[in-house]
């Protein structure tokens, strides 16, 4: 009896911790009509994004990642894990600049018609599933699969940002 009660409590606690994260889409952005409010929305990334670029021998600056040896060359790597929170730091047209790092470096996301208008990672160039993105003023290569990284939002949070509500009484035939 105590065991089943304890299991029920644990299940209830875990169920209350579930997240309402959904993909941020072009239609959601249009419906919500968020302008400056977008900077108050907490975004999350759906998939791991690994960025890397090769360093010249004279270059030793590290933006926020690690220096690794890849194929015998020094490389800087920046890892943005799935579920990492980010904030909007700007917009250009339908693109949103999302920063996952305290230094303000950002990645661009925009609606992708191939993914139902979900905001996916934008690159200067895609070669299959690998791309070249601008990050912290430098070109970085993306890991395979970064092309499917989408922005997620907490649905409850976006609902709280909407303040217009109307209840109608209905109409009857005269």
Image (cartoon, grey):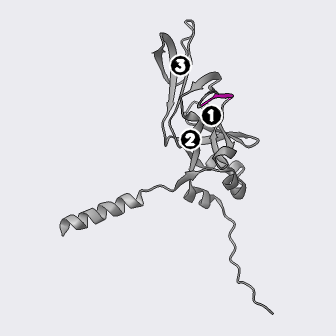
Residue 35 lies, with reference to residue 66, above or below; the image says below
Which residues fall within the magenta stretch? 124-128
Question: Decide: marks 3, 2 in contact (CB < 8 A)?
Answer: no
Where is mark 2, residue-wise? Answer: 86
- Other-residue count near label 3 (Cα within 10 Å), few / some / many at <14 / 14–19 / ≥20: few
Q: Main secondary structure of the magenta part?
A: strand
- Give me the disc on residue 62: 3
Give the Cα separation between the discs numbered 1 and 2: 10 Å
Residue 58 lies, with reference to residue 40, above or below; the image says above
Secondary structure beneath disc 3?
A: loop
Q: Which residue is rendered at x = 68% and y = 41% of the image? A: 110
Foreground residue, 110 or 105? 110
**Disc nearer the start of the sequence (3/2):** 3
Foreground residue, 126 or 83? 126
Q: Magenta stretch containing residue 125, yes or no?
A: yes
**Picture coordinates of residue 105 (x, y %)?**
61, 30
Residue 67 lies, with reference to residue 38, above or below; the image says above
Give the Cα separation between the discs numbered 3 and 2: 20 Å
Q: Which residue is rendered at x = 68% and y = 77% of the image? A: 167
- Other-residue count near label 1 (Cα within 10 Å), few / some / many at <14 / 14–19 / ≥20: many
């Amino acid at each position: 009896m105590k065991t089943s009660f304890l299991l029920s409590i644990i299940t209830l606690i875990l169920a209350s911790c579930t997240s309402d994260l959904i993909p941020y889409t072009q239609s959601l952005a249009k419906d919500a009509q968020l302008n400056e409010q977008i900077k108050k929305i907490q975004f999350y990334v759906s998939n791991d994004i690994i960025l890397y670029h090769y360093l010249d021998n004279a270059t030793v600056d590290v933006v926020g990642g690690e220096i690794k040896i890849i194929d015998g060359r020094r490389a800087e790597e920046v890892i943005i894990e799935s579920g990492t929170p980010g904030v909007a730091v700007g917009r250009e047209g339908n693109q949103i600049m999302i920063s996952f790092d305290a230094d303000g470096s950002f990645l661009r996301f925009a609606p992708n018609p191939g993914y139902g208008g979900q905001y996916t990672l934008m690159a200067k160039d895609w070669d299959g599933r690998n791309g070249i993105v601008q990050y912290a003023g430098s070109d970085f290569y993306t890991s395979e699969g970064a092309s499917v990284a989408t922005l997620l939002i907490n649905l409850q949070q976006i609902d709280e940002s909407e303040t217009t509500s109307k209840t109608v009484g209905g109409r009857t035939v005269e």
